[in-house]
Image (spheres, rainbow, N blue to C red):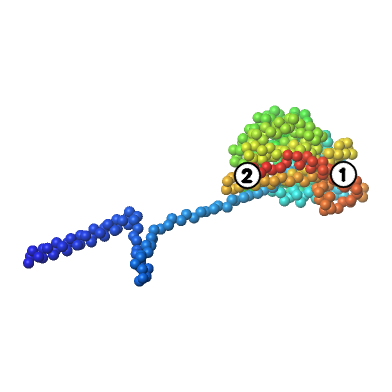
């Protein structure tokens, strides 16, 4: 009896152990990643079974990041000058004040909307006590700066051959007056020679400015002052400044440069050679002034990126003209619109597009009084500006427009590499 009980106990123990071991084996298969299979009969007429695999699928969601693009517009003009006849025209004998704002009424719509508008302020504002004057040693009323601010200018280049027309005091007063009207300047400095960096729409632009000379007025500054108060063209200096601008993590570098031969419609060999060097050192845009006539523009592709040079933007405002100079090209200027685009995702900034707006200085009399106006020529030719439609004036403006655009059309196409 006891023996039979022992046998039954042993068999029960064996069955228990087999069940325990099988359970461990199944759990171990799951631990190893071997999935269980469930068998479900399809119907009563079929002996076939369907195997359903519950293995999880790994689905990767592709996150396509849209390119984040930012843009800004730079508008640049050439020489802004105030000769004596212009001062007389702006002076109101009744109020004893100067008003230059009407001069810019037709071009304001281009200057003001630009993110950054810049031009060459080729005069000084030394103060009334010095006496206002035109060429050869300019001294212009502060009202000119008020008009430029009202027109929409943000930056004035003050490095040119007239920077020291009234010495150190004139240079310092000019800088102070420019800042007083909420405009910034480049090229001349009161103390430390700094690099102007403007950030608009997450795009950082560095601005530099240089001049070939100072009309022999260098002596009005001490040697150490001359080293930092006026940026004279020096290859080592320009290269060094470009490197400092790069260190400020700018996206583009603009160089405003006063160079070339007056009244020559083609750039000199020196301009072209220096321009290519400046581009090679890292500048992206070169804006030329001084010749008082429009010189050609050029696209230079370097390392797959388009760089831009305009050797001279001509006279934006002056009294120089055919009647006074025997040279009709001194009446011509061009506003250059540069569209800049930055891919914020890739951190790549390019010159996306360039537009040219030829201008002409209209000098006329009304009821015996002299007036000056800067005309966007195409607006006049379209009939958007009504100032009289004498055949001689239209013919003159058509010629001016064609003369300017002839220089701009050459080598001025943004490459497909952008």
Q: Are marks 1 and 2 in contact (CB under 8 Å)?
A: no
Is residue 52 something one can see in this rendering?
yes
Relative image position of residue 339 (x, y in whole percent): 69, 47
Relative image position of residue 110 (x, y in whole percent): 75, 49
Quarter of the image for the C terminus: give it.
top right
> Residue reaching furthest left?
1
> Residue reaching furthest bottom?
44
Q: Secondary structure at mark 1?
A: helix
User: Which residue appears at 20% of the width and 62% of the height?
Assistant: 16
User: Which residue appears at 59% of the width and 41% of the height?
Assistant: 249
Could you tell which of marks 1 and 2 lies nearer the N-terminus? 2
Is residue 171 something one can see in this rendering?
no
Residue position marked by numbered label 1 in the rendering: 396
Residue position marked by numbered label 2 in the rendering: 349
Relative image position of residue 51 (x, y in whole percent): 37, 62
User: Which residue appears at 91% of the width and 48% of the height?
Assistant: 391
| Residue 265 marker | none
Q: Secondary structure at mark 2?
A: strand
């Amino acid at each position: 009896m006891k023996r039979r009980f022992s046998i039954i106990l042993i068999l029960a123990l064996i069955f228990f152990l087999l069940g325990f071991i099988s359970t461990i084996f199944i759990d171990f298969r799951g631990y190893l990643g071997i999935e269980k299979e469930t068998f479900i009969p399809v119907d009563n007429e079929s002996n076939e079974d369907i195997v359903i695999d519950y293995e999880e699928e790994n689905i990767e969601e592709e996150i396509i990041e849209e390119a984040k693009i930012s843009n800004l517009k730079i508008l640049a003009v050439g020489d802004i000058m105030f000769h004596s006849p212009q001062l007389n025209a702006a002076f109101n004998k009744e109020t004893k004040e100067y008003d230059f704002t009407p001069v810019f009424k037709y071009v304001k719509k281009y200057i003001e909307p630009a993110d950054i508008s810049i031009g060459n302020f080729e005069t000084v504002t030394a103060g009334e006590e010095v006496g206002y004057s035109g060429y050869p040693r300019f001294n212009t009323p502060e009202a000119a700066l008020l008009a430029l601010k009202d027109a929409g200018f943000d930056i004035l280049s003050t490095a040119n051959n007239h920077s020291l027309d009234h010495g150190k005091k004139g240079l310092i007063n000019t800088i102070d007056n420019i800042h007083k009207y909420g405009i910034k300047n480049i090229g001349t400095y009161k103390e430390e020679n700094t690099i102007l960096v403007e950030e608009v729409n997450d795009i950082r632009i560095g601005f530099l400015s240089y001049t070939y000379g100072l009309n022999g007025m260098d002596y009005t500054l001490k040697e150490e002052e001359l080293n930092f108060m006026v940026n004279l063209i020096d290859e080592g200096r320009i290269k060094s400044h470009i490197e400092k601008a790069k260190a400020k993590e700018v996206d583009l570098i603009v160089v405003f440069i006063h160079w070339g031969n007056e009244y020559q419609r083609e750039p000199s060999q020196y301009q072209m050679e220096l321009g290519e060097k400046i581009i090679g050192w890292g500048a992206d845009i070169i804006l030329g002034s001084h010749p008082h006539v429009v010189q050609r523009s050029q696209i230079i592709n370097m390392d797959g990126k388009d760089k831009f040079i305009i050797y001279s933007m001509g006279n934006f405002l002056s009294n120089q003209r055919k009647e006074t100079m025997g040279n009709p090209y001194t009446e011509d200027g061009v506003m250059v619109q540069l569209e800049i685009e930055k891919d914020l995702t890739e951190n790549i900034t390019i010159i996306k597009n360039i537009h040219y707006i030829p201008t002409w200085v209209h000098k006329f009399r009304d009821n015996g009084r002299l007036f000056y106006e800067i005309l966007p020529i195409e607006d006049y030719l379209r009939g958007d500006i009504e100032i009289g439609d004498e055949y001689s004036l239209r013919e003159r403006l058509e010629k001016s427009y064609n003369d300017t655009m002839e220089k701009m059309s050459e080598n001025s196409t943004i490459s497909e590499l952008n």
